[in-house]
Image (tube, grey):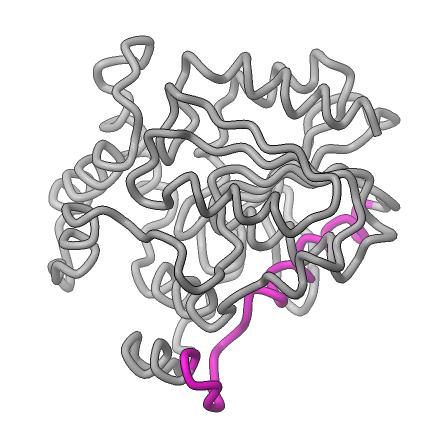
């Protein structure tokens, strides 16, 4: 399995396309493994002349899981973050950003176009602000600035997020929970295979199931707070993309990202929610590749 030591942990990655082509680094979101990037998206970007690298973030998939790491409760993390109180967390979003940069170091890559989805969008925001000399362009997909006052998940999704889950579900129970979660945040795309959610949930469970890792990533997001001041420092060419039908992270959250980055371009896709629906993959390839090729 292709793994590298980076930032004190091991990261699992896959590398597609010519070794001498410009690099696109794909960074996935909260509790989501790299397998969530559609194969057609990766193949499309390679066909456009790019070398595409995607990887599992720490605490997910086949990368290092910080098993046994002590972490505060979600409630205390929210309170401490809100009032600026000290927090002792296993890691922060900025540490996950450093993971991505150290992966580039390990692969001998000086600069890359960085693309992040959801939490991955937050991670690439940190990379663009802190490691600007390593970035050719940034694309943030269905993410947020973290600013206070932005709309949050709708009531139905918020209720689901607060629902207690079984401590030790069976494989079938975990897969069913995964299917329900994916379906709730995804666009009802007629181009999607009827069993796509079941296949993805089963594949994710069999590859690496770790609810505690999800929780540690969530704590990092909560503690990150508003990135508005940081966004104002970003000078790299930026594309911001969001689905208009997103019920988990409303599109106004991405609009706010674009508002705070000088020269950023904002693209709103009607037929997309908090996912990368099959019917929109070709459009996403054109957007990402076109933005990268221009810079």
- Decide whether residue 100 is among the magenta residues: yes
Q: Quadrant location of residue 114?
A: top right
Q: How many marks?
A: 0
Q: Quadrant location of residue 264?
A: top right
Identify the residue at the far top of this view: 191
Vertical side of 276 occupied by 115: above or below: below
Residue at 59 percent of width and 54 percent of height: 123
Residue at 73 percent of width and 13 percent of height: 48
Q: Which of the pair 5/156 is nearer the observer?
A: 156
- 236 horizontally vs 273: left or right: right
Residue at 54 percent of width and 53 percent of height: 57
**Where is residue 182 shown, x and y percent of the image?**
27, 36
- Decide whether residue 90 is among the magenta residues: yes
Q: Which of the pair 89/121 is nearer the observer?
A: 121
On the rendered image, what quadrant is the N terminus found in? top right
Vertical side of 34 occupied by 65: above or below: below
Vertical side of 18 occupied by 201: above or below: below
Region rendered in magenta: 81-107
**Where is residue 262 shown, x and y percent of the image?**
74, 46
Q: Which of the pair 18/220 is nearer the observer?
A: 220
Residue at 53 percent of width and 59 percent of height: 58
- 244 horizontally vs 92: left or right: left
**Where is residue 26 shown, x and y percent of the image?**
62, 38
Identify the residue at the far bottom of this view: 86
- From the image, give the main secondary structure of the stretch colored magenta: helix
- 267 horizontally vs 262: left or right: left
On the rendered image, what quadrant is the C terminus found in? top right
Vertical side of 80 occupied by 235: above or below: above
- 284 horizontally vs 234: left or right: left
**Where is residue 47 shown, x and y percent of the image?**
70, 12
Q: Quadrant location of residue 251?
A: top left
């Amino acid at each position: 399995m292709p793994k590298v030591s980076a930032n004190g942990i091991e990261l699992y990655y896959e590398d597609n396309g010519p070794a001498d082509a410009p690099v696109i680094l794909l960074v996935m979101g909260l509790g989501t493994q790299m397998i969530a990037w559609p194969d057609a998206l990766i193949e499309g970007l390679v066909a456009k002349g790019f070398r595409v690298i995607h990887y599992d973030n720490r605490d997910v998939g086949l990368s290092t899981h910080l098993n046994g790491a002590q972490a505060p409760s979600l409630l205390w993390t929210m309170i401490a973050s809100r009032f600026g109180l000290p927090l002792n967390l296993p890691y922060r979003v900025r540490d996950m950003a450093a993971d991505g940069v150290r992966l580039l170091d390990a692969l001998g890559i000086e600069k890359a176009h960085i693309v992040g989805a959801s939490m991955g969008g937050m991670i690439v925001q940190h990379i663009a602000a802190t490691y600007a000399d390593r970035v050719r362009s940034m694309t943030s997909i269905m993410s947020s600035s973290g600013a206070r006052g932005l709309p949050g998940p709708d009531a139905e999704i918020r209720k689901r997020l607060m629902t207690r889950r079984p401590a030790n579900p069976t494989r079938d129970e975990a897969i069913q929970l995964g299917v329900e979660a994916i379906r709730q945040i995804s666009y009802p795309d007629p181009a999607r295979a009827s069993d796509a959610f079941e296949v993805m949930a089963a594949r994710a469970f069999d590859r690496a199931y770790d609810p505690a890792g999800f929780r540690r990533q969530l704590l990092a997001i909560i503690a990150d707070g508003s990135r508005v001041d940081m966004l104002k420092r970003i000078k790299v060419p930026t594309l911001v993309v969001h689905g208009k039908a997103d019920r988990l992270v409303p599109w106004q959250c991405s609009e706010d990202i674009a508002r705070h980055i000088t020269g950023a371009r904002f693209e709103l896709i009607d037929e997309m929610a908090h996912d990368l629906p099959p019917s929109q993959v070709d459009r996403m390839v054109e957007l990402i590749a076109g933005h990268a090729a221009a810079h």
